Amino acid sequence: MTSVTANATGQPGLPLWLLFELTYRCPLQCVFCYNPIDFARHSRELETAEWLRVLREARALGSVQLGLSGGEPLLREDLEAVVAEAHRLGFYTNLITSGVGLNEARLAALKAAGLDHIQLSFQDSTRELNDFLSHTRTFELKRRVAGWIKQLGYPMVLNCVIHRLNIDHIDRIIELAVDIGAEYLELANAQYYSWAHLNRDQLLPSRAQLLAAEQATQRWRARLGHRMRILFVVPDYYEDRPKRCMNGWGSTFMTVTPDGTALPCHTARMLPGLVFPNVRDTPLREIWFASEGFNRFRGLGWMKEPCASCPERTLDLGGCRCQAYLLAHDAAAADPVCAKSPHHGVVVAAVARAQRANASERPLVFRRREESLARSPGDE
Amino acid sequence: MTVPALDASARPAIARGFRLQWEVAQGAFVLLYPEGMVKLNGSAGEILQRCDGNRTLSWIVADLERVFARRDLAADVVAFLELAADKGWVEWRPSAERPGAQS
C-alpha cells in the first residue's frame, strides 16, 4: 500500500461524485466512445443487490451526486431499482442516456423512483450522421423523448459530441436543439481516449473548423439569450496547458465499471501496472482511502519534471494520467498537452495533421464487440 | 429579479431541478443540481432552508432575526437572495393573491 499524499487538510477529499457504468452493452457503436477498447472482455455485470450495496457504502462515505451511465444504462432492467434506492439514500441522480429504448412508461417509472435529472445525448456516430443531419429518424426519436422529458417537468439538457465530421454542421445541430426545446446544450469536442483515440486523426477538427464553430455558437448565444445556454468545449489538443483532470486523481470522483472495478476516472483502467480494486470483494471505504490504485497519483508527490518544480502544478495537477500514458507512454509524465512537456511534439504533430484536407486515410473503427475482441488479448 | 426581491410578500423557493439538503459528511448544507453541487456556508444554508415557496421574504427575515437575536438582517438576506436568484438557485413565487387580483 502506498501512503496517502496529504492535501491541505491532510486527508484525501470525499468521493462526492459517483459514476455507475451499469453496463458496457449499447445499441450504438460510436467512434468516440470512451469505454475501454477491451470492453467485450468484461461482460460479467454486477447484480442488482451488489449495485444497491455499493450505493449504501458510497453514501456512508459522503457520495452525493450519482451518474448512471454505460454503455446504455436503459439496457439494465433494474435501472428503476437503482434509482429508487439512490433517491431513498439522498443521492442526486443523473441519467446519462442516448434515449434509445426509452418509452413513456419507463420514463414515468424512473420519475416515480425519484430520478432528478436526464442528460440526453445525440449519439451521432457518423454512421448515423446523414440521418442525424437530415432531421429524420434521429430527430423524431429525440423530439419524442424530449417531449416526454419536458412533460415530466425535467429541464431539457442535450449533449452532442463534436468532432471533425460533424463540426461543420454546428448551426444545424444548434437549430435542432432549439427545435426540440432544449434549455441547455453541451457541445463537447471528443476527448481522445479509447475509441476516440483510435480514431483521433479522423475526429480532430482543424483550427479553421473550430474557429467557425465557435463563431457560430456565439451568434446563436446572442440570438437565444437565456432561452438556451450553450457550452462549447474545445479539444485540449488546441490548448497549451492541460486540464485539471477529474479535479485531481482520487479527490472527488469514483467510477464503478459494469464488472465492479472501482476507478478514479472512467478511463483509468487502461493504465498498465496499476491494480484497481473490485467492489465485489473490497469495501468502498478501503478502496477510496487505502487502495494502491486510488493513492498512486493523489496529491503532488508522484510528479516528475517538468511538473515537480512547476509553479502551475497545483493548478492543473500535471493534467491527465491517461493522456500521459497514451501520448508519452508513461502515466507519471506531464500531460503532453502542456507546452512544457518534452512530449508536446506529439500533440503538435497531431494538430498539424488536422490542418490538412485529408487528415487520415484510415477507415473509422466503430465501437463494436467484434472490434473489441479483435483488439484486446483474451483468455480464450 | 430585483423587483420581486424587494417585495416583502414574495415567496422565494428553491428552483426546479435544485435540491437543498444537509450533508453529514461535509457538515454543511449543500445545493444539488444537475451534475453539480454547491457547498453552502452557514448563513446561506440558514436562509435557503427557509425558502420553501410558502414563507414570505418578510417572514424569513423576521425568523432569522429572532433565531439569531439580530435586528438588521433584511439587507443581507435580500442581497443573498438576489445573488441566489441570479445564479438560478432560487425562484420567486408571486405574493399571495389579494382580493380582486387576477390569478
Image (tube, rainbow, N blue to C red):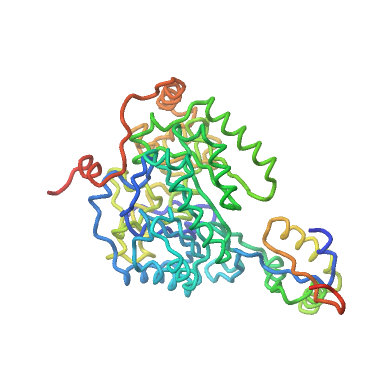
**Is residue A361 shown left or right of residue A206?**
left
Extreme-left residue of the structure? A380
Q: Nearer the viewer, residue A81 or A177?
A: A177
Q: Nearer the viewer, residue A299 or A93?
A: A93
Tag count? 0
Q: Residue B37, how many percent across, how many down?
A: 57, 59
Quadrant housing the N terminus of chain A:
bottom left
In the rendered image, is residue A283 in sight?
Answer: yes
Instruction: Measuring from the top left, give residue A192's x and y in whole percent.
Output: 40, 37
Q: Is residue A36 left or right of residue A171?
A: left
In this rendering, the answer to whether A59 lies above or below A324 is below
Residue A214 position by quadrant:
top right
From the viewer's perspective, is residue A354 above or below residue A33? above
Nearest the eye: A164 or B50: A164
Q: Residue at x 67, y 64 (%)?
A: B41
Measured along the vertical axis of the image, is residue A7 above or below residue B33? above
The answer to whether residue A50 is left or right of residue A209 is left
Identity of the residue drawn at 45% across and 42% down: A132
**Frontmost residue, A52 versus A13:** A52
Residue A124 at what x, y percent from top left?
A: 43, 43
Residue A114 at x, y = what percent? Answer: 50, 71
Q: Quadrant of residue A283?
A: bottom left
Res. A322 visible in picture: no
